[in-house]
């Protein structure tokens, strides 16, 4: 059975200050990729941490139509900050992610799953490097391996490709999309590159200044009006020769 | 791309198993060092016995004279084992403090727990005031224990407050060190000459205070604590990837921290209460373990325990060998020996140690 995630008037409070409010979505189904976009500090990471159960706030988070309770969450979340200073190898850190809440003993199946995930992200060659010897992009791939190895049903990725080169971005997003399709995972990812959003996402949620502006199919949400209203940039959406939509920025380098 | 994914993937598994074997070998080597050190420790003292003789006495061989047997079993054994157990306890406490506070500077010594214990002991030594008045035989130890526990709990509850970072905790620990050192100085200033020398000796830390009952209590604390830590091995390792990540893996971060801190406070306080201030073991032991086996708690914790025990036992050997017939207070030697050793390890390793 595929998992669904639905948000109803979800918000986030730090003490008395409300940093995010009124996020309501239709049921986000397993197999679909939902991109969360919006300016810096709009509240995207706060929303992710709220769904992952790390922050408190009003509203209901429903998974498979059951309201999420406090405590350990069934959601797998990859934080934006991937910096670590731990003396562990990549392999150990991925195995570690898999063993949480599982029997203490490491089974053959655990090791096979770790190998499979490392291989699918093409990071098997750095498996025995220390986490603190990795580049930013490599750390991001390892973080992704750590959530994938847990065989998630609901996957929250906070800017999973921000440190990756173009080839890796395309590759990783394609992998995420195919995993979503094949295993019925409900993927929600925050991402700034609108062209990648157009390529990978089925649905887009726009967050601005602590509220949800809209949530809908990609091509109805990413429009010149959105570029103007949310990002204050003059731009168009055009199809390339292979009919993929692309964002094209018009005008001079300076903003109006 | 590799020719065959199946073969390439199996390589990862194989390499991991080799890594695990290597870690187990390191643990075994540490255990061997520890055993040899304890045997040497038993042989040293005003009368020196060879390793051979010590082993025979331990085996209960009839060829060993009554006198040798009494010296080794009744006089030296509690001290030698106390070194092992205290080293293990302080190192395990330091290792888990560094883990849950996410800070390489955390240890019972640097966070003021030892300083608090010294103050508690000095109050008993100078004024004869016991915080639990009925336990008159143990007032020095009990005062030290109570103050150490209070300091540990204070650190813990402050660390639970909103917006408190790991840096704040270390700053807080340092303020505790200064506060208790100032109070200790005040007590020393008011003390009689005789009491003053007792306080100074106590703060140096000495294993010669060891007795079988004290050894039994300390051993019991270690024996209860270590399985509690091991049960949480995966969760504790995950904490070192950051709170958000650990929580997203389903670790109940707050609860694991609270439980661990409670156990640490006991582990750190009991040895200090019995043998006085012994610095650096809690700091150095875990760092050596980290460099040898990394931070997978399934190996990191045993390695910390073994290296802490081995360092304190070796220090005990050294403290008896410098001037034959004289036993230097072990607290002095630990820092002088432990720190250069740690330094050489840090300088010789190419990988970042923290």
Image (cartoon, coloured by chain):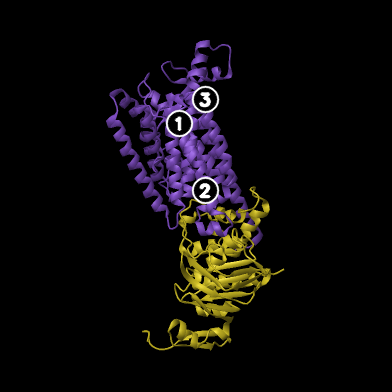
Same-subunit check for callouts 3 and 1: yes
The furthest residue to the right: A1
Q: Position of residue B288 (x, y in %)?
A: 45, 41
**CA distance for labels 3 and 1:** 19 Å
**CA distance for labels 2 and 1:** 26 Å
* Residue under numbered circle 1: B132
Where residue B213 is drawn, which disc sits there?
3
Pointer 3 local density, CA inside 10 Å: few below 14, some 14–19, many at least 20 = few
Q: Position of residue B322 (x, y in %)?
A: 36, 24
Q: Position of residue A79 (x, y in %)?
A: 51, 64
Answer yes or no: is residue A171 visible. no
Q: Which chain is yellow?
A: A
Depth order, front residue of A65/A109 = A65
Quarter residue B248 falls in: bottom right
Q: Colour of chain B?
A: purple
Same-subunit check for callouts 2 and 1: yes
Depth order, front residue of A28/B26 = A28
Pointer 2 local density, CA inside 10 Å: few below 14, some 14–19, many at least 20 = some
Task: Identify which residue is drawn at 40% across, 40% down.
Answer: B109
Vertical order, B338 against B6 (above or below): above
The kind of secondary structure element at disc 3 is helix
The kind of secondary structure element at disc 2 is helix
Depth order, front residue of B188/A43 = B188
The furthest residue to the front: B133
């Amino acid at each position: 059975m595929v998992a669904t995630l639905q948000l109803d008037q979800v918000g986030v409070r730090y003490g008395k200050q409300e940093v995010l409010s009124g996020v309501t979505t239709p049921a986000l189904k397993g197999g679909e990729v939902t991109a969360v976009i919006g300016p810096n500090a709009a509240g995207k990471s706060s929303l992710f941490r709220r769904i992952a159960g790390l922050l408190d706030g009003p509203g209901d988070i429903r998974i498979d139509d059951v309201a999420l309770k406090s405590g350990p969450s069934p959601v797998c979340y990859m934080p934006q900050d991937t910096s670590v200073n731990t003396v562990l190898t990549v392999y150990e850190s991925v195995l570690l992610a898999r063993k949480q809440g599982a029997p203490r003993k490491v089974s053959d199946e655990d090791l096979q799953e770790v190998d499979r995930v490392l291989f699918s992200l093409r990071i098997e060659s750095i498996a025995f490097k220390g986490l603190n010897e990795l580049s930013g992009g490599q750390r991001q791939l390892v973080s992704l391996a750590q959530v994938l190895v847990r065989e998630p049903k609901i996957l929250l990725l906070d800017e999973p490709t921000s440190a990756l080169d173009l080839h890796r971005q395309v590759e990783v997003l394609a992998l995420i999309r195919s995993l979503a399709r094949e295993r019925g995972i409900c993927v929600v990812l925050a991402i700034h590159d609108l062209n990648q959003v157009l390529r990978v996402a089925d649905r887009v949620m726009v967050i601005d200044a602590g509220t949800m502006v809209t949530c809908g199919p990609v091509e109805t949400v990413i429009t010149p009006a959105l570029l103007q209203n949310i990002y204050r940039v003059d731009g168009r959406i055009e199809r390339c020769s292979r009919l993929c939509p692309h964002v094209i920025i018009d005008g001079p380098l300076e903003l109006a | 791309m590799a020719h065959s994914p199946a073969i390439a993937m199996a390589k990862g598994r194989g390499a991991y198993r080799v890594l695990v074997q290597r870690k187990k070998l390191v643990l075994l080597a540490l255990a061997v060092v520890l055993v040899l050190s304890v045997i040497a420790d038993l042989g040293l003292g005003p009368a020196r016995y060879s390793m051979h003789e010590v082993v025979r006495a331990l085996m209960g061989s009839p060829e060993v004279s009554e006198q040798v047997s009494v010296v080794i079993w009744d006089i030296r054994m509690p001290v030698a084992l106390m070194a092992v157990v205290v080293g293990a306890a302080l190192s395990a406490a330091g290792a888990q403090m560094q883990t849950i506070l996410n800070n390489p500077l955390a240890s019972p010594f640097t966070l003021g727990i030892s300083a608090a214990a010294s103050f508690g002991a000095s109050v008993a030594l100078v004024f004869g005031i016991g915080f639990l008045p009925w336990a008159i035989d143990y007032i020095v130890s009990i005062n030290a224990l109570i103050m150490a526990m209070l300091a540990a709990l204070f650190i813990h509850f402050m660390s639970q407050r909103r917006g408190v970072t790991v840096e704040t905790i270390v700053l807080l620990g340092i303020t505790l060190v200064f506060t208790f050192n100032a109070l200790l100085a005040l007590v020393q200033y008011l003390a009689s000459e005789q009491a003053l020398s007792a306080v100074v000796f106590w703060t140096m830390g000495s294993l010669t205070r060891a007795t079988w009952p004290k050894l039994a209590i300390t051993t019991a604390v270690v024996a209860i604590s270590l399985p509690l830590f091991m049960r949480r091995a995966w969760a504790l390792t995950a904490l070192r990837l950051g709170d958000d990540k650990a929580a997203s893996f389903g670790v109940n971060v707050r609860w694991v921290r609270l439980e661990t801190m409670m156990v640490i406070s006991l582990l750190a306080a009991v040895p200090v209460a019995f043998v006085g201030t012994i610095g650096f073991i809690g700091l150095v032991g875990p760092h050596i373990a980290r460099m040898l086996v990394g931070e997978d708690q399934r190996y990191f914790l045993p390695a910390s325990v073994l290296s802490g025990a081995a360092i304190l036992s070796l220090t005990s050997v050294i403290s008896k060998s410098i001037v034959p017939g004289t036993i230097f207070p072990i607290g002095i030697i630990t820092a002088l020996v432990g720190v250069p050793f740690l330094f050489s390890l840090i300088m010789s390793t190419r990988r970042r140690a923290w």
